[in-house]
Amino acid sequence: MTVIGGIIFTIVSYLAHNVWPNYMQFKDPDSASYEIMALVGGNALEAGFLAVTAFVVFGSASAAQASASRVLYAMGRDGQLPRTFFGKLSKKTKAPVNNILLIGFLSLSALFLSLTLVASFINFGALIAFTFVNISVIVLYFGKKKQRSFKGIILYFLIPLIGSALTMWLLFNLDTPSKVLGSIWFGLGVLYLLFLTKGLKQQLPGMDKDEAM
């Protein structure tokens, strides 16, 4: 699916570039796709594209809000966030209402933040996560499990090493505001981790086995 998605994005980008080669001429880069649609198919195609985009964005935002609220609930349930707020479910719907409302409130920041800044901020978190995933593969399989055959060196050292290097390169090429805000957020996370583990002397809180049953 990743390969198919990449091929589709490449084809769409190629066709869009052929239609509008000079990207500097867009009135608003955030709405460039609408300008391209208007050029290709006039007002009818632009209106249809806008309607489809609205449905897609609504579905994507709903899925993101639902999944993120469940992640916060899991962290609250396990004691990694305050249980009294994050670890509660509605008695009627069994949904983490507090988390849904919190994410909805934070989403209102889109009213005054630029799309570019928000996207860069999200990219910072994603790239940090991808980097540590690759590093974790090296530490776990190549280090602790000693998977050091020829296949192990390729799969558990070289590939994740290249992956982490590429994500770090992308991370350092983000704009300055996103790196500053992302670094502050990352630093707060590290401090909170040290607080939960009492300076890394204890394991992170987790769900009790009795609760899991």
Image: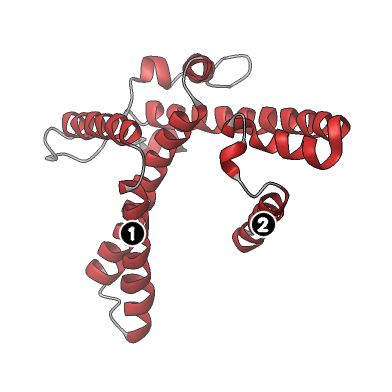
Expressed as whole percent of the image width and height from the top left, the position of residue 195 reads 17, 28
Q: Nearer the viewer, mark 2 or mark 1?
A: 2
Give me the disc on residue 7.
none
Expressed as whole percent of the image width and height from the top left, the position of residue 10 reads 64, 58
In the picture, which quadrant includes the N terminus? Answer: bottom right
Q: Which residue is mark 2?
A: 14
| Residues marked 2 and 1 touching at CB (< 8 Å) | no
Residue shown at 81% from the left, 42% from the top:
40
Q: Quadrant of residue 178?
A: top left
Residue shown at 33% from the left, 62% from the top:
137
Residue type pointed to by label 2 = Tyr
Q: Quadrant of residue 51?
A: top right
Whether residue 102 appears in this view of the structure is no
Q: Is residue 191 left or right of residue 98?
A: left
Q: How many marks?
A: 2
Mark 1 packing: few (<14 Cα in 10 Å), some, or many (20+)?
many
Camera-nearest residue between 204 and 9: 9
Give the Cα separation between the discs numbered 2 and 1.
28 Å
Q: Quadrant of residue 164?
A: bottom left
